Amino acid sequence: MQSYDIPLHDIKPIVDVHEYSLYYFLGVAGAAILLAGGILYLIYLWLKKRKRFNIRKEHKRVLNSLAFIDAKRTAYAITHYGATFKNDTPRHGEMYKNLTDRLEAYKYKKEVDGLDKETLGYFELYKEMCDV
């Protein structure tokens, strides 16, 4: 019978191999996902800001496009849309109060004449003061 118990001198014992490539891959993939998420979030904020409704801009547009055909409706519109800008500075508040005092004569009557030149001048000055 043959003996299989031969001493082998050239075979080494099993050694632990430290392989970190999986951890490197997971780290790079995680960083890429965070970066892509951040970029998508910034794009979302940009699109949201771009399409946001700006009430000040809309009221400034309405004030600039007022037709002075009906003085009563115009007086109400100036009072309503001009109130958006009255709290910007104390000067705006004072100008708005002065303008609304002048427009009182056109509001609460059944029949009114057209707006006078002085009131129109105050309104034009107030329009120029308003910033969006």
Image (cartoon, rainbow, N blue to C red):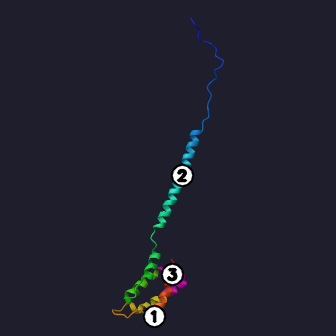
Residues at marks 1 and 3, CA–CA distance in whole angstroms: 20 Å
Mark 1 vs mark 3: which is more N-terminal? 1
Residue wearing tag 3: 130
Q: Which residues are magenta?
A: 84-96
Mark 2 vs mark 1, foreground winner is 1
Tag in front: 1 or 3: 1
Against 92, is 105 above or below? below
Q: Secondary structure at mark 3?
A: loop
The type of residue carrying mark 3 is Cys
Residue found 58% across the figure and 11% down from its top: 4
Contact, CB < 8 Å: mark 2 with mark 3? Answer: no
Give the mark count: 3
Local packing at callout 2 (Cα closer than 10 Å; few below 14, some 14-19, many 20+) is: few
Structural crowding at the residue carrying mark 1, measured as other residues with C-alpha within 10 Å and reported as few (<14), some (14–19) or many (≥20): few
Q: Position of residue 46 (x, y in %)?
A: 50, 63
| Helix, strand or loop status at disc 2 | helix
Neighbor class of circle 3 (other Cα within 10 Å; few <14, some 14-19, many 20+) is some
Whole-percent x, y for residue 14 in the image: 61, 26
Residue 117 marker: 1
Mark 2, residue position:
34
Tell me where residue 99 appears, x and y as whole percent.
Answer: 47, 89
> What is the three-letter code of the residue carrying label 1?
Lys
Q: Are marks 1 and 3 in contact (CB under 8 Å)?
A: no
Residue 70 belongs to the span the image colors magenta:
no
Q: Residue 78 occupies which quadrant of the picture? A: bottom left
Q: Position of residue 101 (x, y in %)?
A: 45, 90
Taking the magenta stretch, the answer to whether it contains residue 85 is yes
> Residue placed farthest to the top in the image?
1
Instruction: Identify the residue at image location x=49%, y=84%.
Output: 127
Most prominent secondary structure in the magenta stretch? helix
Identify which amino acid the numbered label 2 is placed on: Leu
- In the image: residue 93, left or right of residue 67: right
